[in-house]
Image (cartoon, rainbow, N blue to C red):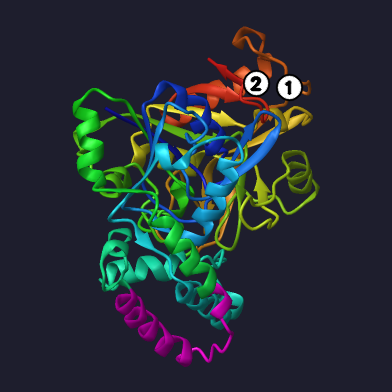
Amino acid sequence: MVDVILGLQWGDEGKGKIVDFFAPGYDIVARFQGGPNAGHTLYVGDKKVVLHQIPSGIFHQHTTNIIGGGVVLDPVTLKRECDVVASFGIDVKKNLFISERTNIIVPTHRALDKASEMQKGENKIGSTLKGIGPAYMDKTGRNAIRVGDLLDKNFNSQYKELRNKHQILLNNFNFAEDISAWEDEFFEAIEFLRTLNVVNSEYFINKQITAGKKVLAEGAQGSMLDIDFGTFPYVTSSNTISAGVCTGLGVSPKQINEVLGVTKAYCTRVGSGPFPTELENEQGEELRRLGSEFGATTGRPRRCGWIDLVALRYTCMINGVTKIIMTKADILDSFKELNVCTAYNIEGKETDEVPFAISKVKIDPIWEAYKGWDCDTTGIKDPTNLPVEMSKYIDFINGYVGAPVKYVSNGPGRDQIIQL
């Protein structure tokens, strides 16, 4: 049995805390896609930890953690994270497993990412410059180096061949930056990666499922950044939706059970691209300030706006969401009035569907106003103590998107989650 936790917006929904909350009930936590552009923020005691590659179940000693074949892995980032995790007394060599099929990000992937983004100028995608896009391009172009290749005696020649291919492209970009320091770090990290548990993960995970083990599949980014169904071309390079679990881990669709979708009580987005409900005013600034809305990976200020139910219903539909977890509800505590987007006005026509060319059309949100609850909710444990206005807000979302909000996060702490 495989349950899935994934983001329903543009990422940054707070999935790390949610996976950490649910992880004790599972035997395995597995990342199925994405790269080091995903920052999952956890709190271990009173210490903040941001994980980019390691699954968010790593701090639970009994939990096996798997990095699946659908991930693109930066060995340098992984080594740094392993050092941080080890400082908490966690033995990553005991409970972290990496698929042989996981694709590796090499230094020239990062260089290509930077060169490509620089060339786009004002039309840049908003890449985190971690090499994710070029790494996935090599995967689909059948040029990639995978973790299993590290065990091959011809690895060095395979690396040089790929580097030479990349250098031709970099020359075309007139990219002359010295990346020798990146390579030194890379090969040091490769030696460390060779000491970890590298497994044929599709057999590994399916044997665990057959044995009755419970698996939690952890997504990165958000559904509106899916390469096929997101706000193209302002998207990531992988399938962030629930279908990506099967291709990213090598499990059958019939093994998927619950799909737990995570959404903020409002909306945020990092980087370029369409954002229909963005607030470029004092309210947007207030959401950013109260929610500390700065990227966990890049530190970039997040764009902020009211919740977009058109987009949320769309992502619930394509993911088959069975339960919704609403995060950062407490950030709305001080607002006297809230707005909810229930439809789009596009060139004078009203629609409740996300359009194909969302990045090419002007969208005017159609709003429904709600009275705010205007009180502190961070200490509430019992759902019957929620403010009436918050309950009405949640009930309306339930009815609109067709999937129930079952959990509400009202603060950053592990214990600040209310089950409805």
The residue under label 1 is which amino acid type? Trp
> What amino acid type should be assigned to the residue bearing mark 2?
Met
Are the residues at dot 1 and dot 2 in contact (C-beta closer than 8 Å)? yes
Of the pair 207 and 128, the residue shown nearer to us: 207
Tell me the quarter of the picture where residue 301 sits.
bottom right
The residue that label 2 is drawn on is 390
In the rendered structure, which segment of residues is drawn in magenta?
156-182
Q: Which residue is at the front of the view, 7 or 147?
A: 147
Name the quarter where the N terminus is drawn: top left
Q: Is residue 175 magenta?
A: yes
Q: Residue at x 58, y 52 (%)?
A: 276
Q: Nearer the viewer, residue 352 or 93?
A: 93
Q: Position of residue 188 (x, y in %)?
A: 49, 65
User: Which of these two is toward me, 52 or 4?
Assistant: 52
Main SS, magenta region, reads: helix
Of pointers 1 and 2, the one earlier in the residue sequence: 1
